[in-house]
Amino acid sequence: MRIDSHSVLDPAHPAFECIAHLNEILTQYDLVIASPSLETGVSIDIRGHFDAVWGIFQGVQPVNSVRQMLARLRETVDRHIWVSQYGMGTVGNASTSMGGLLRSQDIATQANIALLSASDNDDYSFIDQKFQPESLQTWGKRGAVINVEMRRYREFVLKGLETDGYTLIDADDSDPDETKEVVKEVKAASKELYRSECLGVSKSEDVSDAELKKLQEKRVKMKEERYQQCKGELSRRYEVEVTPELVEKDDNGWYPQLRLHYYLTVGREFLTSRDSKRAKAQAEAGENAIWKPDFNKGQMLSSVLLLESLNLLQLLTPGEKLRGSDERMQKFKAIALQHRFLIKNYLNVTISEKLTSIAIAQKLLDKIDLRLSYIGRLGPRGKRECVYKFVTPNDGRDCIFKQWLSRELVSVSSNINVPTPITDTTSLPSNEDMGGQENPTDSWWQQVKCYVVSFMERLESGVDAIKEFLSTLKSDERWGVMVVFEEAQPQIFGQLGFLGQQL
């Protein structure tokens, strides 16, 4: 059957504005393509119009959602499906027990609050961590089920379909060569269509803040409006020119990777303020109560401190050759194994003894979208081993970091609370792995105490000239001054808040 572009129903079509007339509308189309959002709440009762239902499930939906989507068409017609062997997403730290999920959230919440209290020198004891415990238990139960099913995604989907009464028939690949050719053509067409989408976003018109807000609130959007909204959001998120390459990178999850790298490096001085604002905003919205999973997702200080304790940035020396047998790489692996439960809980990266030091490094570097490049097997005969080196990426992140840093500096004001040294040595929350075994993390938690002291020591040196200059100004003038420093010294901007309070 030949399908042309006019017989495909666009989900953004204005016809979808009235769901009550959905069945009537669908009869006007030969082929309807739906996103995973088509699940419960939609009933297609058309008879004698559609010949089959096709589904491609890559693992982004829970198992039950797959079955719900296939059942939207009530008529008994053939269902043709392809299901990934493994799922793509997990809940929480991917634990398969309710207790494991709930304990991980409890530990993460206590740790994040303790880190904020130590770094921000503020009291966060007002936060209510016992918000809706019955809802949290339900979340843990369902999350554990989803995590189990994601590990054997295809198996659970097929079992569920059998339970629903479907008869499963394996597809007959009578001509493998022909099938491979079809797959090749489909992939090529898919890539071409996606490139066209990325180009369409980058070429769309720029919109103002007010126009973007209207687009975001609009339920039904035409294609050009979707392009404009996407471009507007990307331009404000990255603050650089929106190119087709940037659109693709963002679709592949570049933003959280880039954000973690930024706060691990040039934006480090602003991380405490960022987490503090998010925590207080969530507490205010919940009348001092927080939903633990959302609260922990919004906090980055624990992840950054953990990567700092692993000294991950030591691997990013351009041109330096790294071997798995190097002493420092072995030390790196030992520290990673020691902190493997924290790494799983805060970074969702699984570390095991069987992994080489290079493999562990690659998994952690992937969190900031960096990799070690393989350069070959070097060494004498019989003792050769793989050698890697870091190659500085040319992906434009430096320009993005510069824009983000400028934005941070513009937002600096005289009411910034800069941390002061603390002497409270009250023990922080203990951490246990999901099996209840003790987790040795004293060295990591100790950083909470020394972080503030280290920050203050940096402020004490090399700023005499700024002190002298600011002393000539009135208190209400100090924060209206635009100070320009050399690009090589961006960290000096983070010191202005402290100096303004000192003078």
Image (cartoon, helix red, strand yellow):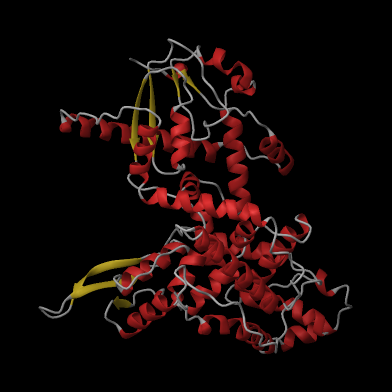
- Give the left or right position of residue 498, taking residue 97 as reference: right
On the question of residue 245 being in view, the answer is: yes
Residue at 73% of width from left, 84% of height from top? Answer: 420
Residue at 44% of width from left, 33% of height from top? Answer: 67
> Does 495 sit above or below residue 227?
below
Quadrant position of residue 128: bottom right
**Viewer-proximal residue, 118 or 10?**
118
Percent position (x, y) of residue 368? 47, 63
Residue at 42% of width from left, 79% of height from top? Answer: 338
On the question of residue 266 being in view, the answer is: no
- Give the left or right position of residue 465, taking residue 192 as reference: right
- Give the left or right position of residue 146, taking residue 172 as reference: right
Percent position (x, y) of residue 154? 34, 42
Residue at 49% of width from left, 35% of height from top? Answer: 36
> Does 86 sit above or below residue 443?
above
Instruction: State the quadrant of the N terminus.
Output: top left
- Give the left or right position of residue 218, taking residue 12 as reference: right
Percent position (x, y) of residue 25? 55, 14
> Does 314 sit above or below residue 244?
below
Query: How many badges with numbers are in the image?
Result: 0
**Viewer-proximal residue, 190 or 480?**
190
**Viewer-proximal residue, 401 or 465?**
401
* The residue positioned farthest toward the left in the image shown: 381
> Does 438 sit above or below residue 86?
below
Instruction: State the quadrant of the C terminus.
Output: bottom right
* The residue positioned farthest toward the top in the image shown: 48
Percent position (x, y) of residue 471? 84, 84
